[in-house]
DNA sequence: CCCTGATTCGC
DNA sequence: GCGAATCAGG
């Protein structure tokens, strides 16, 4: 497959984007990973975090016999111990934009130049479009207490409040404005409190002695 | 073993 | 110029 301009451009983009040579090769199609790497080097865009970089030159006289391996088969291949160029690849990885509050504040001081500001109603400062300061990132929405939609629900146990320790017996019906859960402490080992366990887990009484059971939630007629 | 990128070198 | 073969670290 030929290296058309489009493919070369695609290769450049993906390479600089950080995709691996394998991914790029797969994306382009018709080329191998080696082809991608070779082309990338030929294009001049090399230097990326490579697992093989620090050519640990043994400074000590330790010169382990270079393993010839297939040197016999490939006689023309010469293991060339090129001079170590330590100063190569000085490309620091792009700093992942540490956007901390402190970092933004440190970029403030610029008192020169008479800024034209005016005080608007309410006391805020008006600024021209050109001299906007670094916008303060709004604090991420955090809720320490589960929101209660209304005052009526303030002390009710909502769905968000359910956990393993409180009775999840429903009071009223879903969708109704005051629908909530019992919220009492559970009968250990059960999802409901003692009282509602008694409702939920009715022992089967002998046929004659059975009475009309209390209505179960969601099942029978509404109880209000 | 797999993965990665780097390098070499015949074509 | 191309890329398989090879190297070498993680």
Image (cartoon, coloured by chain):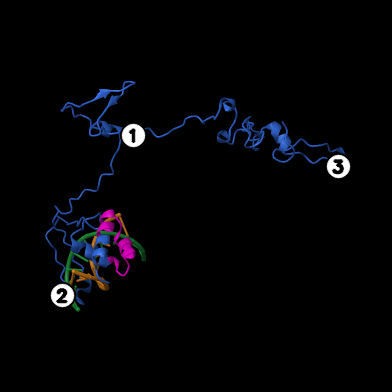
Chain colours: A blue, B green, C orange
Tell us which disc is closer to us: 2 or 1: 1
**Above/below status of A57 relative to A137:** below
Question: Residue A2, how many percent across, how many down?
Answer: 25, 71
Structural crowding at the residue carrying mark 3, measured as other residues with C-alpha within 10 Å and reported as few (<14), some (14–19) or many (≥20): few
Secondary-structure class at tag 1: loop
A12 or B9, nearer to the observer: A12
Residue position for label 2: A76
Q: Chain of mark 2?
A: A
Main secondary structure type of the part rendered in magenta: helix
Question: Residue A117, how many percent across, how many down?
Answer: 23, 25
Mark 3 and mark 1: span between their CA atoms? 69 Å
The quadrant holding residue A73 is bottom left
Q: Could you tell me if residue A137 is visible in this image?
A: yes
Which mark, by number, is residue A207? 3
Of the image marks 3 and 2, the number of the one nearer the N terminus: 2
User: Magenta stretch containing residue A105, yes or no?
Assistant: no
Residue position for label 1: A137
């Amino acid at each position: 497959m030929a290296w058309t301009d489009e493919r070369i451009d695609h290769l450049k983009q993906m390479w600089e984007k950080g995709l691996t040579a394998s991914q790029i090769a797969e994306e382009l199609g018709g080329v191998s990973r080696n082809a991608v790497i070779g082309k990338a080097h030929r294009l001049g865009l090399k230097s990326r975090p490579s697992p093989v970089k620090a050519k640990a030159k043994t400074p000590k006289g330790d010169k382990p016999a270079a393993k010839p391996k297939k040197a016999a088969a490939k006689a023309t291949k010469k293991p060339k111990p090129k001079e170590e160029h330590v100063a190569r690849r000085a490309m620091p990885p792009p700093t992942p934009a540490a956007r901390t509050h402190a970092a933004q504040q440190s970029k403030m001081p610029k008192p020169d130049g008479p800024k034209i500001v005016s005080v608007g109603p309410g006391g805020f400062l008006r600024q021209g479009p050109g001299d906007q300061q670094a916008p303060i990132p709004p604090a991420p929405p955090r809720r320490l207490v589960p929101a209660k939609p209304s005052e009526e629900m303030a002390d009710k146990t909502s769905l968000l409040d359910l956990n393993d320790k409180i009775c999840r017996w429903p009071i009223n019906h879903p969708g109704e404005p005051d629908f909530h859960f019992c919220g009492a402490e559970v009968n250990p080992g059960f999802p409901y409190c003692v009282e509602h366990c008694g409702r939920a887990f009715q022992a089967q009484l002998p046929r004659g002695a059975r009475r009309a059971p209390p209505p179960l939630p969601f099942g029978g007629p509404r109880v209000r």
